[in-house]
Image (cartoon, rainbow, N blue to C red):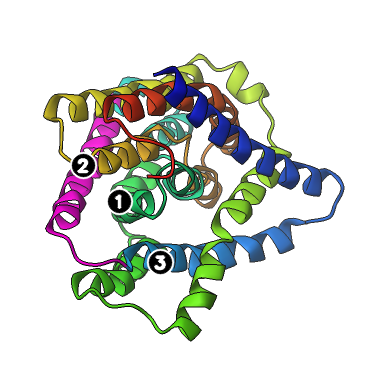
Amino acid sequence: MLESLITVAKQVGILFILMSIGFVCNKKKLLNDTSIKGIVELLVLIVTPCLIVCAFQRPFEPRLLNGLGWALGGAVLSHIIGIAVSYFLCSREKQKECVLRFATIFSNAGFMGIPLEYALLGNDGVFFGAVYVVVFNLLCWTYGLFVMCSSLKDMKLVSLIFNPGTVGIFCGLPFFLFSWNMPEVINKPVEMMASLNTPLAMIVVGFYLADAKFKTVLTYPKAYSATFLRLIAIPLLVLAAFMFLHPDNGIMATAVIIASSAPVAALTSMLATRYSKDISLSVGLVAGSTLLSIITMPPIVGVAMWFFKIKAGG
């Protein structure tokens, strides 16, 4: 088990070193809000789908198809647990309650989860982790909007169907189902774009960490509860569920556990800004949980890798 813990801690440490580059770029004004927004657009609209397509280019195996079903169930279970426990965070201040509940339910499965899944589990990790991202998007733009604004009037069917997770899977799934491979002249550029995912995602997270103000979080007790639920309670419950069910595909289970143990979704701050909720609290939760995840993720993911006998790299 110690070897698994060390492996995960090392990979999380690498991600945080990459985050520090984004932090420095912010402080030294090497990047600004406009340029980082462009990087986010590139990352979300091009790099992430390329990474998913690359992960799906593999010969068809019933075992992997079965694993996708398990991953879908695990992702849904993780969000259901989040929705259930988020009701413990009721507050008289509705602007804060919305942020607390959203932050508890939705993890940074894309920016933090996928890079770590790729580092620890290889393409198999991304293969299953992509399913979690799809479930995240479907629930985020339906139930998540309802939590933030108590209305579904802003829900758009186009956003549900055409988002990076679903586009990546829709494009990549035929390659897996029919054991297809792209021509090398196309595959190489796609692979090169996919390789940008981890450094770009971490630079973006680090950039936003540099602007974080922690006072709101440190002086608000319910923020501690939300952070505990997001980083510890939910992933431990998902881990316990997989240990009990003991699925045949340990890489799939570990990928889902990585996604469920990721810190608060960066989208929390974006939606809090859009719907005039407590912005300071949202930024503090994203930043604080991201920093704390360097402590919480290694033991949880390490136990999963040890239990399922997974070695880093898949």
Tell me the number on the disc at residue 249: 2
Tell me the number on the disc at residue 50: none
- Which amino acid, by three-letter code, is at mark 3? Cys
| Residue carrying label 3 | 54
Q: Residue at x 46, y 18 (%)?
A: 222
SS of the residue under disc 3: helix
Is residue 42 found left or right of 296 in the rendered image?
right
Q: Is residue 136 magenta?
A: no
**Image marks 3 and 2: residues in contact by CB distance under 8 Å:** no
| Residue 193, above or below 74 | below
Q: Residue at x 19, y 76 (%)?
A: 178
Report whether residue 90 is seen.
no
Q: Position of residue 219 (x, y in %)?
A: 61, 16
| Residue carrying label 1 | 128
| Residue 152, above or below 221 | below
Q: Bounds of the magenta span?
A: 58-85
Q: Nearer the viewer, residue 177 or 288?
A: 177
Quadrant in which the C terminus is drawn: top left
Q: Residue at x 35, y 46 (%)?
A: 144
